[in-house]
Image: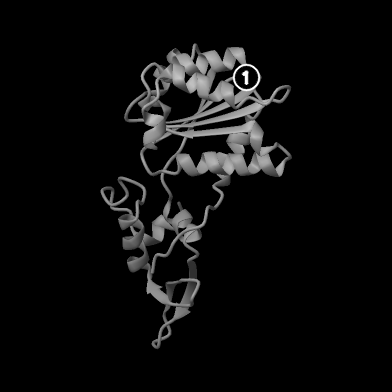
Amino acid sequence: MIGSRKLKKRDRYLNKLIGFQDTEPVKVITGIRRCGKSSLLKLMVIHLIEMGIQPEQIVEMSFEYNDFRKMTADDVYAYVKNQIVSGKRMYLFFDEIRRIDAWEDAINALRVDLDCDIYVTGSNAYLLSSEYSTYLSGRCVEIKMLPLSFSEFLYFYDFEVRETKSALGGVHKQVFDKNGEQYGLREAFEAFMLFGGMPGIADVGLDQEKALAF
């Protein structure tokens, strides 16, 4: 039922990010784990390339990877400085940089020393928005992400909701995948909860019909 998923746009958040492109504040994307922060960074990179920014002007560092996790703040600064293209504006992407001690020193130094546009992700569980502002000397703007809603889940996994008639003449909503396989709405909703749905939905008793309006 659930296959691999291609990167799809979440315009609600991507448009916010694009709106702050090439502005001074550090763009900080926050949210719980697995809500799509890393994917949003990738979507922003794709956007930049589509608008003519050269790949060599883009530096991406994910601190989920062991090689980067071993770095110090000074190492991060030096790594980025070594990637600089003379005379070009740089676009810097740091995924889960809060894993690095004194990470804010590296970000603040890069912001001051370079002609650059900086994007950072961080989990809400580790830092509050007020703390990001303090660490970055108030020079940041926060974009808060939520996990997929039920309707986004259906879109991301190429499901389509259709109204079908039963043998007795009643009308029911059914879910169809890209291969034409048919599933009940309850079955699709249970898959949504299993594969990282919005926390708290089951606890508040939200039924499948109402979830479609999210």
> Residue tagged by mark 1?
24
Amino acid at pointer 1? Glu
Residue 13 pos. (x, y %): 54, 40
Query: Which is nearer the eye, 155 or 83?
Result: 83
Along the line of sight, the residue nearer the viewer: 133 or 82: 82
Determine the residue positioned at 57% across, 44% down.
Answer: 43
Q: SS of the residue at dot 1? A: loop
Instruction: Please state the horizontal and vertical placement of residue 5, each as a whole percent of the image.
Output: 47, 58
Pinpoint residue 145: horizontal percent, then vertical percent: 45, 38
- Image x and y of residue 22, in percent: 66, 26
Question: Which quadrant does the N terminus fall into?
Answer: bottom left
Is residue 157 left or right of 58 when viewed as pictured?
left
Residue 13 visible in this rendered orientation of the protein: yes
Res. 100 image quadrant: top left
Residue 90 image-quadrant placement: top right
- The answer to whether residue 21 is left or right of residue 199 is right
Q: Residue at x 53, y 13 (%)?
A: 109
Relative to the observer, which residue lies in front, 58 or 83? Answer: 83
115 vs 170: above or below: above
Mark 1, other Cα within 10 Å: few <14 / some 14–19 / many ≥20: some
